Amino acid sequence: MNKKSIKDIDVRGKRVFCRVDFNVPMENGNVTDDTRIRAALPTIEYLIGQGAKVILASHLGRPKGKVVEELRLTPVAKRLSELLSKNVAKSNEAYGDIAKSEVEKLGEGDILLLENVRFYPGEEKNDPELAKSFSELADVYVNDAFGAAHRAHASTEGIAKHLPAVAGLLMEKELDVLGKALSNPDRPFTAIIGGAKVKDKIGVIENLLDKVDNLIIGGGLGYTFVKAKGYEIGKSLLEADKIDLANSFMQKAEEKGVKFYLPVDVVVADDFSNDANIKEVAIDSIPADWEALDIGPKTRETYADVIKSSKLVIWNGPMGVFELEKFANGTKRVAEALAEAGDTYSVIGGGDSAAAVEKFHLADKMSHISTGGGASLEFMEGKQLPGVVALNDK
Ligand SMILES: Nc1ncnc2c1ncn2[C@@H]1O[C@H](COP(=O)(O)OP(=O)(O)OP(=O)(O)O)[C@@H](O)[C@H]1O
Ligand SMILES: O=C(O)[C@H](O)COP(=O)(O)O
């Protein structure tokens, strides 16, 4: 990495504004998956160890510049405090006099979590005034929010103009692992792309088609490809305006000698729920009133075989509606195959794929689980991430 990290500067006794990505799933005021919080612990613990005054900032959800009670970071402060076995103060503001007075109370090694930065309209607009106000809380800026590094926002980009700005340890690790995988991949190199929408994955599919040996498609976005091949897909997800694009991807894959894998069978349902009637059908037999919500058993085994014969696999996006047990088998099988594949380096990029791997208790079997969904996607598209560009060069 050509950017400075916290190890390159002296943070002892300093007020450190550390942007983290604590955009975690919550239910009834409790954090339901703390992966992203745990991923930030090395940086936070390092800062504590250095005697810094640690000011943490994050977004949660998309409150669109307004205070949304359910999107306060209070439950995150509680969870972080449990993980660190240490008090984590929580502010109801993210800048201004109240936040300043709370920062003033910090001793060396203390931690304050600011309120959700997206409660302020200036955050997503990258308002220079707001960025300046954030910077007034601190002496140093650390960006450890790889998951939000693709956003040019006040707390991820603008603030870096006002303070010495360096990467945290998580940011550094993510950039090193993903960068190495894409610039010099071990082969066979396989990408598995799933999730809901083709439109979200256009860039990554385009870029990866130039790099991979195998491209596996699953999830809701797969049905636009299935339709493009001429099959009826019933009520499955379809982006009709992306059919031509899907065709052009399949053509490009053929030209480049990339093996392109689509489901050959699927699990269809008569309702989008765990109570639905379901059946497994071949890809050419999706009933008109039914919806494909997972890949079928033959597809699962083919995908597992491709995974196991690969040296490097990048996975972004679930194979089905894994949140519902009836449609989790495809995603689970992919995760298991990655876990079983001994000498395959597995990179899980994507909030949902990471959540799935956690859910199946296979996280410790993966080589690297990226904390970035959109960020890892953009990285895989070959784009520059504004939150990284803004940091000080080495
Ligand atoms: N066949 C399907 N039909 C409808 N929805 C599906 C289907 N397969 C997967 N999904 C849904 O797609 C969602 C994930 O899509 P998304 O594109 O956000 O994935 P992702 O890239 O992993 O997300 P993130 O950006 O958070 O990492 C899941 O909630 C899942 O239920
Ligand atoms: O969950 C993510 O991918 C990051 O936290 C960024 O969130 P956003 O897509 O709402 O900017």
Image (cartoon, helix red, strand yellow):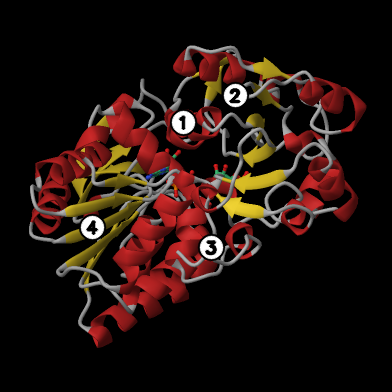
Of 82 and 49, the residue lying toward us: 49
Q: Earlier in the sequence, mark 3 or mark 2?
A: 3
Q: Earlier in the sequence, mark 2 or mark 1?
A: 1
Mark 3 and 2 residues: CB-CB less than 8 Å, in contact? Answer: no
Q: Is residue 386 above or below residue 273?
A: below
Foreground label between 2 and 1: 2
Task: Please give left or right for residue 260 compared with residue 156 in the image.
Answer: left
Foreground label between 4 and 1: 1
Q: Which residue is mark 4?
A: 313
* Mark-to-mark CA distance, 4 and 1: 26 Å
Q: How many marks?
A: 4
Residue 198 visible: no
Q: Which mark is residue 191?
A: none
Tell me which residue sits at (25%, 28%) in the image.
Answer: 360
* Mark-to-mark CA distance, 2 and 1: 13 Å
Q: Earlier in the sequence, mark 1 or mark 3?
A: 3
Q: Which residue is mark 1?
A: 41
Q: Earlier in the sequence, mark 4 or mark 3?
A: 3
* Mark-to-mark CA distance, 4 and 3: 27 Å
Label 4: state its secondary structure. Answer: strand
Q: Which residue is mark 2?
A: 109
* Residue 169 horizontal/vertical position (percent): 46, 45
Of 273 and 307, the residue lying toward us: 307
Q: Amino acid at mark 3?
A: Lys
Q: Is residue 17 above or below residue 343?
A: above
Q: Earlier in the sequence, mark 4 or mark 1?
A: 1
